[in-house]
Amino acid sequence: MKKSKEAFLAILDENRQIIFKVCNMYCRDKEDEKDLVQDVIIQLWNSFEKFDGRVKISTWIYRIALNVAISFYRKSKTRANHSADFDESFLQIAPSEGPNYDEQIDLLKQFINNLDQMHKALMILYLDGNSHEEIANILNISKSNVGTKINRIKQKLKVQFENINTL
């Protein structure tokens, strides 16, 4: 049975934050981000009839958005800096508790932006509250590999913060 345009638009509306988070992480330039959002939506539309419901719709959207974003990132040879800024609200961290809070948030963003593509995608999904199983499904890696990678990234970030604090 052919899936309707209305159903697609409803799914897109319900899950638009996923698309914007992923695109924002892979694009510094707002015009590039708009292009990437369009590319993701086109790919979602082209794949919509093939969606069979075996995975959650959010998993399907993450998978496509990340694949399109990584391809977009790789194709872009003219980009001066391959890291991207992202909105503070993305982190969903507790309210400020000290004078250095904003500085620490900026450092965390910087550290995450310097991760390679796979690890950046992993952190997007992790910080967005996805379970290890959901992350594994989206990135096509094992659940145990997700846990291992997250722990290694956390350790790396901890060391980076400690190095900054000792300066």
Image: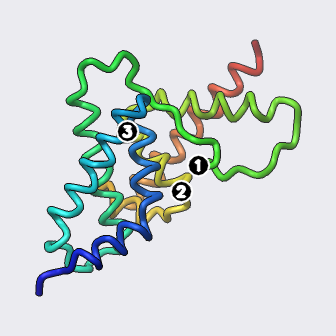
Q: Quadrant of the C terminus?
A: top right
15 up-or-down from 100: above or below: below
The residue tagged 3 is 33
**Which residue shows up at 30% across the image and 57% down it?**
63
The residue tagged 2 is 128
11 up-or-down from 46: above or below: below
Given residues 68 and 142, the one toward you in this image is: 68
**Which residue shows up at 30% across the image and 74% down it?**
55
Q: Quadrant of the N terminus?
A: bottom left
The kind of residue on which mark 1 rests is Phe
**Which residue shows up at 23% across the image and 61% down it?**
44
Q: CA distance from mark 3 to mark 1?
A: 16 Å
CB under 8 Å between callouts 3 and 1? no
**Which residue shows up at 20% across the image and 56% down it?**
43
**Label drawn at residue 90:** 1
Element at badge 3?
A: helix
